[in-house]
Amino acid sequence: MKLFQRLSMAIAIAGSLATSGQVYAELTQIKAGKLIDVVQGKVVSAPVVVIEDGIIVSVTANGKIDNTARLIDLSDHTLIPGLMDMHVHLTSDANKHGYKRLASSLPDVTITGVNNAQVTLMAGFTTVRNVGAPGYADVALKRAIEQGSIPGPRMFVSGPSIGVTGGHCDNNLLPPSYNVKSGGVADGPWAIREKIRQHIKYGADVIKFCATGGVLSKGTKVGAQQYSQEEMNALVAEANLRGLVTAAHAHGNDGIKAAIKAGVNSIEHASFLDEEAIQLALEMGTYFSMDIYTTEYILSEGEKAGILQESLDKERVVGQRQRDSFSAAVKAGVKMVFGSDAGVYPHGTNGAQFSRMVRFGMTPMQAIQASTINAATLLRQESNIGSIDVGKSADIIAVKGDPMENISLLEAIPFVMKQGIVYKHD
Ligand code: ARG
């Protein structure tokens, strides 16, 4: 079946069920060769998973099949919880960077987001955290997906990333006469608190901010801190007050440490880690979300896509350093989640990062846990998603063969179910 046919079928099913008010009313059972139990960290043989109304109602090893219920036979497949990517930008097009991106309007990037949401779901990612989008386009996408109007992953969204004037989360491409300023710019504790309140008003459920400079922004020093400790403290305190999870873009050590001290829930990128930063993260229980695949795309395709020369120069320093830091953090036992920064590179290829995570120090089980149960816990959603367990949403994918032996299987996912609805079955 062609992709669009499959999609329209899934939409038709979701739509008709939604309008009839009886969502996923039938009983479905999946019989598989293996199942990855990410909570126990082990592989279960010959599982049978029963799903009712989009919720997992039983999981048994060597379970019996009920002949009266719908059966999905995946006997030569391994079931894995739906993958979760904690760092994406669905509204970004990987072919348009730097000045090329300036030509896109808010409606343009919103439509880009609709396409990327489909592509991401079809790649097996049933949940994403979108950490930075203009004009609350991410909120609109999330709502359309929840209403069943378009197919896509479950979304947690930040609205525009919060940051200092002229920092990584601002837009510094044009001269002052254009008066361009990103929607997340806020300087000083009270301006930051007001920005968070505004984001919540318009639908954000995560707070993303820039603690340091970055690779892809013009004129920022990748290692230098941008928000002061006082500002980060206020930001995290305000987000906590309102019950929101926080994520800090941070490459340089000073910014990483300041964000951890402020109590941030996850450090994004975490490139220049030293021993002290790793110890602080262990003490505070901070998650690291390290996009260690991106560097390959930036250095091979970046120039064509419009990435600035200065950014390519920065990447040549950051890429390898970040991979070394990743190995050190994994070895030290820091809590890790899967975060790709897809949008910098093409959506739908998020899974390319798994093999790098294994190459740079994780076991296949750890890499899968990072993108399932750890991510769910970071989002405080571990009672709803993140593992194939009774009472959780039936967000289940499958690969043919055993990902413990070949982690690259996660680069092309043949079976995708989200909330009990099959979106893909090749
Ligand atoms: N959005 C990030 C930045 O501009 C991308 C960093 C990509 N490079 C890397 N080695 N992870 O800073």
Image (cartoon, helix red, strand yellow):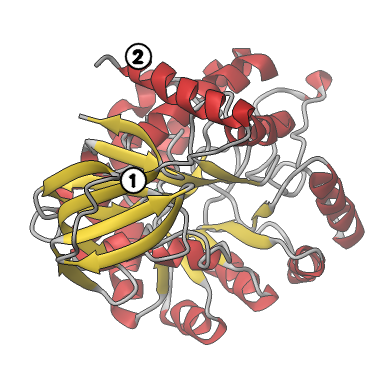
| Figure quadrant of residue 273 | bottom left
Question: Is residue 8 toward the left or the right of residue 286 in the image?
Answer: left
Report the disc number at residue 28. 1
The residue lying toward the viewer, choosing from 50 and 170, is 50
Left or right? Give the position of 266 relative to 69. right
Q: Nearer the viewer, mark 1 or mark 2?
A: 1
Circle 2 sits on which residue?
A: 5
Where is residue 19? Give x, y as percent.
63, 26
Q: Position of residue 417 (x, y in %)?
A: 36, 41
Sequence-first disc among 1 and 2: 2
Pick the quarter of the image with the N terminus. Answer: top left
Q: Quadrant of the C terminus?
A: top left
Whole-percent x and y of residue 409?
Answer: 16, 45
Residue occupying the point 65% across, 61% down: 246
**Is residue 312 something that shows in the picture?**
yes
Q: Name the foreground residue: 70 vs 392.
A: 70
